[in-house]
Image (tube, rainbow, N blue to C red):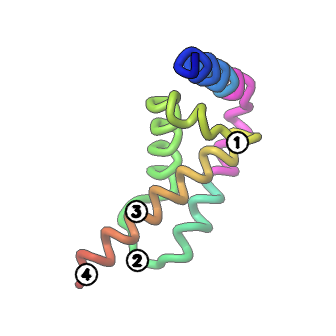
Amino acid sequence: MTGEHDVTRLGEATDRLSDLVRETNWEELTPRLLAYASYSLAQYPSRSHRTPHDYVVRAVFEVLENSEHYAQTAQKSMFSLIAAVIAQLIAADVQDKTVEDR
């Protein structure tokens, strides 16, 4: 019974994420995501060789490619979801760069 319930919840979450992707105004969202990535990168000068655009593209791809994972943690807005992924990607790159510099 629990397994069926989990599958149902995952299906509902995936449907919500699909609706969110479909309803998103990407022309309005993309500049906001770029601004967020730019601001986030500015916190770590010379710690990443990637551009804000690189992070936005990687984050959107990550959410779409792994929709089952992100559906379970989908937030109220596409901006919140993708911004969280951008932050994770930047943090991972900064950590990797810090380790390389040692």
Q: Is residue 48 above or below residue 72?
A: below
**Distance from Cα at disc 3 to Cα at disc 4:** 14 Å
Residue 84: where, in percent of width, then height?
A: 59, 53
Q: Secondary structure at mark 2?
A: loop
Tags 3 and 4 in contact by the CB under 8 Å rule?
A: no
Of residue 59 and residue 45, the one placed in the foreground of this image is 59
Decide if residue 12 is on the left or right side of residue 4: right
Q: Secondary structure at mark 4?
A: helix
Kindly report which numbered mark, 1 or 4, lies closer to the viewer in this rendering.
Answer: 1
Q: Amino acid at mark 3?
A: Ala
- Which tag, 3 or 1, sits closer to the chain's start? 1
Judging by the rendered image, the residue that carries numbered circle 3 is 92
Checking the image for residue 101, the label placed there is 4
Q: In front here: 83 or 7?
A: 7
Main secondary structure along the magenta-highlighted residues: helix
Give the Cα separation between the discs numbered 2 and 3.
14 Å
| First along the sequence among labels 3 and 4 | 3
Give the labeled residue for mark 1.
75
Q: CA distance from mark 1 to mark 4?
A: 35 Å
**Which residue in the protein does label 2 denote?**
46
Q: Quadrant of residue 81?
A: top right
Q: Earlier in the sequence, mark 4 or mark 2?
A: 2
Asked if 71 appears above or below 102 in the picture, the reply is above
Q: Residue furthest front?
A: 1
Residue 78, position as x, y percentages in the image: 68, 39
Question: In the image, is 17 to the left or to the right of 66?
Answer: right
The residue mark sitting in front, 1 or 2, is 1
Name the one closer to the observer, 48 or 98. 98
Residue at the extreme bottom of the image, as rendered: 102
Disc 4 marks a residue whose amino acid type is Asp
